[in-house]
Image: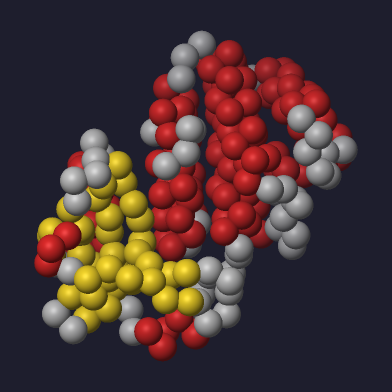
């Protein structure tokens, strides 16, 4: 729809009516846009790709904001829509779901390309990591459940914090690199996040882009 510069718009934030968080808001020509995703300055192509996907393929009213230090994609919204916000999980819950999707994708690829024996060893390795790092809810049966049950359908997510997600993704990348012999697997499994709702996937990607993990999983 539009590619805008910082001087073209007014940026602010408002209190979400139902959750304890501030919602970034962009105002342009009397219309209001809500932040969808943030990209680093060297990720112009990724930002433009998401913007084109939303505008050209999905018919969304979006703007791409170009700033010296970052790019960001914003979607048109009426402020009263926030009262009916469809986000069903907390920010941490979204990170947990996405990390479990990546975990399962690596597990499935190991089983498919390296065989069931290697998949069984990987399951033991992951269980060992979760226990050594003192993750909540990490019995052997619960570990097996995390590897096989779609996290988008779990009645209750593990009681993890953001630091647990970072640890899991760091260790998952280390293990995956050991099993496959290189880090190419990380780019291949990213497509598994397509099953997440767009707003939640965008939140995870924005978080990932700004975390120490960005170089591992991009």
User: Which quarter shows the C terminus?
Assistant: top left
How far across and how far down the image is residue 201, in percent?
46, 54
How far across and how far down the image is residue 103, in percent?
61, 36
Residue at (76, 52) in percent of width and height: 159
Q: Residue 54: tell me if it is visible.
A: yes
How far across and how far down the image is residue 34, in percent?
34, 70
Residue at (63, 56) in percent of width and height: 93
Question: Up-down: is 59 above or below 159?
Answer: below
Q: Residue 46: tell me if it is visible.
A: no
Q: Quadrant of residue 100?
A: top right
Q: Nearer the viewer, residue 140 or 131?
A: 131
Tell whether 121 sits left or right of 203: right
Question: Up-down: is 109 above or below 102?
Answer: above
Tell whether 203 sits left or right of 95: left
Residue at (72, 55) in percent of width and height: 157
Residue at (20, 42) in percent of width and height: 45
How far across and how far down the image is residue 17, in percent?
53, 82
What colouring style does the render use? secondary structure
Q: Nearer the viewer, residue 125 or 109?
A: 125
Question: Up-down: is 151 above or below 119?
Answer: below
Question: Up-down: is 150 above or below 155?
Answer: above
């Amino acid at each position: 729809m539009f590619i805008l510069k910082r001087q073209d718009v007014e940026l602010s934030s408002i209190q979400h009516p139902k959750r304890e968080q501030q919602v970034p808001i962009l105002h342009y020509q009397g219309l209001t846009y809500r932040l969808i995703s943030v990209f680093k300055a060297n990720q112009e192509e990724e930002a433009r790709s998401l913007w084109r996907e939303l505008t050209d393929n999905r018919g969304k009213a979006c703007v791409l904001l170009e700033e010296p230090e970052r790019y960001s994609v914003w979607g048109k919204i009426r402020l009263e829509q926030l009262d009916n916000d469809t986000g069903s999980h907390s920010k941490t819950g979204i990170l947990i779901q996405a990390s479990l999707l990546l975990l399962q994708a690596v597990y499935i690829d190991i089983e498919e390309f390296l065989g069931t024996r290697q998949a069984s060893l990987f399951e033991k390795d992951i269980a060992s990591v979760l226990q050594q790092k003192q993750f909540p809810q990490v019995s052997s049966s619960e570990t097996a459940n995390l590897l096989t049950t779609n996290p988008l359908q779990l009645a209750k997510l593990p009681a993890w914090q953001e630091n647990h997600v970072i640890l899991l993704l760091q260790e998952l990348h280390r293990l995956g690199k050991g099993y496959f012999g290189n880090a190419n697997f990380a780019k291949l499994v990213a497509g598994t996040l397509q099953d997440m709702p767009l707003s939640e996937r965008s939140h995870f990607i924005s978080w990932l882009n700004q975390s120490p993990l960005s170089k591992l999983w991009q």
